[in-house]
Amino acid sequence: MSTPSSSVNPALPVRVKEIEQQLRALLAPTHLEVLDESAAHAGHAGANAQGFGSHFRVRIASPAFAGKSRVACHRLVYDAMQNFINQGLHALAIEIVKDQ
């Protein structure tokens, strides 16, 4: 008996709203922009046939980043996004920004 893969669940598309909610809850950002760039990657390996939910850009500032290296900040964002990666998010561009 085979077990379904838990790494990708096509029934749960990744959306900007859910990403924003997750990042706000876990990192309390003072600046947050989430851009769905999936349509620009149609046909690219890792893009889904629907053209959404696979490629995102996050611009974020958070007090959680204080005193941390850029790599450590990126790790915090990746950790916060893990459930979306499990749902099929293929590419995540992270831009750590200074408070505006």
Image (cartoon, rainbow, N blue to C red):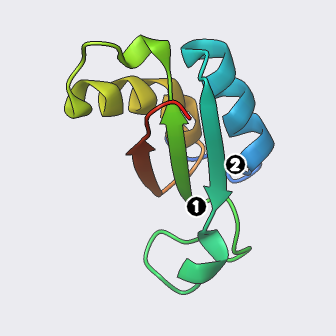
Whether residue 2 appears in this view of the structure is no
Q: Closest to the observer: 52 or 36?
A: 36
- Placement of 90 over or under 85, stated as above or below: below
Q: Amino acid at mark 2?
A: Val
Question: Split into 4 quadrants, where in the image is the C terminus?
Answer: top right
* Quadrant of residue 6 within the rendered picture: top right
Q: Residue furthest front?
A: 100
Question: For the residue labelled by badge 1, is the local secondary structure a helix, a strand or a loop?
Answer: loop
Q: Residue at x 59, y 23 (%)?
A: 29
For residue 79, side relative to residue 30 (left or right): left
- The disc at residue 54 is 1
Q: Closest to the observer: 9 or 91?
A: 91
Q: CA distance from mark 2 to mark 1?
A: 7 Å
For residue 79, side relative to residue 31 (left or right): left
Please state the horizontal and vertical placement of residue 57, each as a whole percent of the image: 53, 55
Question: For the residue labelled by badge 2, is the local secondary structure a helix, a strand or a loop?
Answer: loop
For residue 83, side relative to residue 50 (left or right): left
Please state the horizontal and vertical placement of residue 17, each as a whole percent of the image: 79, 41
Q: Amino acid at mark 1?
A: Ser
Q: Residue at x 47, y 57 (%)?
A: 90
Whether residue 29 appears in this view of the structure is yes
Q: Residue at x 41, y 33 (%)?
A: 78
Q: Closest to the observer: 11 or 20?
A: 20
Residue with the mark numbered 2: 14
Q: Residue at x 58, y 39 (%)?
A: 84
Marks 2 & 1, CB-CB < 8 Å contact: yes
Please state the horizontal and vertical placement of residue 80, each as a whole percent of the image: 50, 24
Earlier sequence position, callout 2 versus callout 1: 2
